[in-house]
Image (cartoon, rainbow, N blue to C red):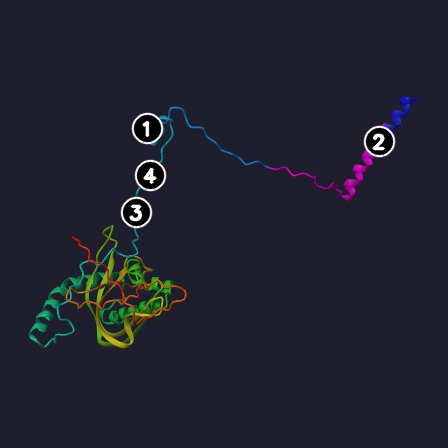
């Protein structure tokens, strides 16, 4: 009797369990999450020091890799270069002393003119080479084109238009134009051209390989310009926006002749040795004042700036 009862209870239990499982699957009933969460302990990576490594010297990793049969990768210590522009100005033009001051009718002016004609033989050969790669190049129209490039580049510099400036100046000229311009305001304006610009020098050098040619043309430009540079406090550092100045410049325009998609860009500027010195830059300097208590007031008229003590020095 007891055995039959246990059998019936076991059968009922199996039937109820199977029916409950089927009901859970049909209704998609899930049990609630557990009341405890497993906490992951912090991993501690501790590598014990090797025995007897203190007195030994470090071995060469290359020889160690060769002994282990591992191919050691060769390291190349090479400096990448940019061949979109040349490294500098090749055979720069030497402006005659007193240019834009001496008349061509005077004795010294005629001497300078004959010297220029004598030195123009190399320039004619370079112009012939440039025309082989650039059929539209002409010395009569190129000077005006170079002046437009110069004006557009300086307008892009004043507005901090980097994309346009990169298309108008070479990679060598870009850092020279933008160096030290951070936190400064530049106001530049091209007023007028005093003399028509003209091509005075041309060279066609090569770099890296013999056929990698660059065209460098020097353009003489005599014009009136205004420039004013303000510091980050709005104080004038250099120049004036209202007073124009006569500026004589020798611009170097360059193009990578081998590249068919290249263009003429501003590459540099030639400053002659006889040029007058530039105007000094007025810098804003903070002068330390006296230490005041909260109830005291600063009187600028009666305060004297302390002079530093004289110190002996040597070169």
Task: State the image coordinates of residue 73 (x, y, percent, origin top left).
Answer: 36, 35
First in residue order: circle 2 vs circle 4:
2
Q: Magenta stretch containing residue 28, yes or no?
A: yes
Report crowding for label 2: few under 14, some 14 to 19, many 20 or more residues within 10 A (C-alpha). Answer: few
Q: CA distance from mark 2 to mark 1?
A: 76 Å
First in residue order: circle 3 vs circle 1:
1
Q: Which residues are magenta?
A: 10-39
Look at discs 1 and 4 and give the one toward the viewer.
1
Considering the numbered disc 1 on the image, is that residue within a helix, a strand or a loop?
Answer: loop
Compared across the picture, whether 5 is left or right of 166 comes to: right
First in residue order: circle 1 vs circle 4:
1
Overall secondary structure of the magenta stretch? helix
Q: Residue furthest front?
A: 295
Q: Look at 86% across and 31% down and name the residue there.
A: 12
**Quarter residue 301 falls in:** bottom left
Q: Give the residue at mark 3.
A: 79
Considering the numbered disc 2 on the image, is that residue within a helix, a strand or a loop?
Answer: helix
Q: Residue furthest left?
A: 107
Task: State the image coordinates of residue 283 (x, y, percent, origin top left).
Answer: 28, 66
Task: State the image coordinates of residue 241 (x, y, percent, origin top left).
Answer: 30, 75
Report crowding for label 3: few under 14, some 14 to 19, many 20 or more residues within 10 A (C-alpha). Answer: few
Q: Give the residue at mark 2.
A: 13
Q: Give the residue at mark 4.
A: 75
Callouts 4 and 3 close, C-beta under 8 Å: no
């Amino acid at each position: 009797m007891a055995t039959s009862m246990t059998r019936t209870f076991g059968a009922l239990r199996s039937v109820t369990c199977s029916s409950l499982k089927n009901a859970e699957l049909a209704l998609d009933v899930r049990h609630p999450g557990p009341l405890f969460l497993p906490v992951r302990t912090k991993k501690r990576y501790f590598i014990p020091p090797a025995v007897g490594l203190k007195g030994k010297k470090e071995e060469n990793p290359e020889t160690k890799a060769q002994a282990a049969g591992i191919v050691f990768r060769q390291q190349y210590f090479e400096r990448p270069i940019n061949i979109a522009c040349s490294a500098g100005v090749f055979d720069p033009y030497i402006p005659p002393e007193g240019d834009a001051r001496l008349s061509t009718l005077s004795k010294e002016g005629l001497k300078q003119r004959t010297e220029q004609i004598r030195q123009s033989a190399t320039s004619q050969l370079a112009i012939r080479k440039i025309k082989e790669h650039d059929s539209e190049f002409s010395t009569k129209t190129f000077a005006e084109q170079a002046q437009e490039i110069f004006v557009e580049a300086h307008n892009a510099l004043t507005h901090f238009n980097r994309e346009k400036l990169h298309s108008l100046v070479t990679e060598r000229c870009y850092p020279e134009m933008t160096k030290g311009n951070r936190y400064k305001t530049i106001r530049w304006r091209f007023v007028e051209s005093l003399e028509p610009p003209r091509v005075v020098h041309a060279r066609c050098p090569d770099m890296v390989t013999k056929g990698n040619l660059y065209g460098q043309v020097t353009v003489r430009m005599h014009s009136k310009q205004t420039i004013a540079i303000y510091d980050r406090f709005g104080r004038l550092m250099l120049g004036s926006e209202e007073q124009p100045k006569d500026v004589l410049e020798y611009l170097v325009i360059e193009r990578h002749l081998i590249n068919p998609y290249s263009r003429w860009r501003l590459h540099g500027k030639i400053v002659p040795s006889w040029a007058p010195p530039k105007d000094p830059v007025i810098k804003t300097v903070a002068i330390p004042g006296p230490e005041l208590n909260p109830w005291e007031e600063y009187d600028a008229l009666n305060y004297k700036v302390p002079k530093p003590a004289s110190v002996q020095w040597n070169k």
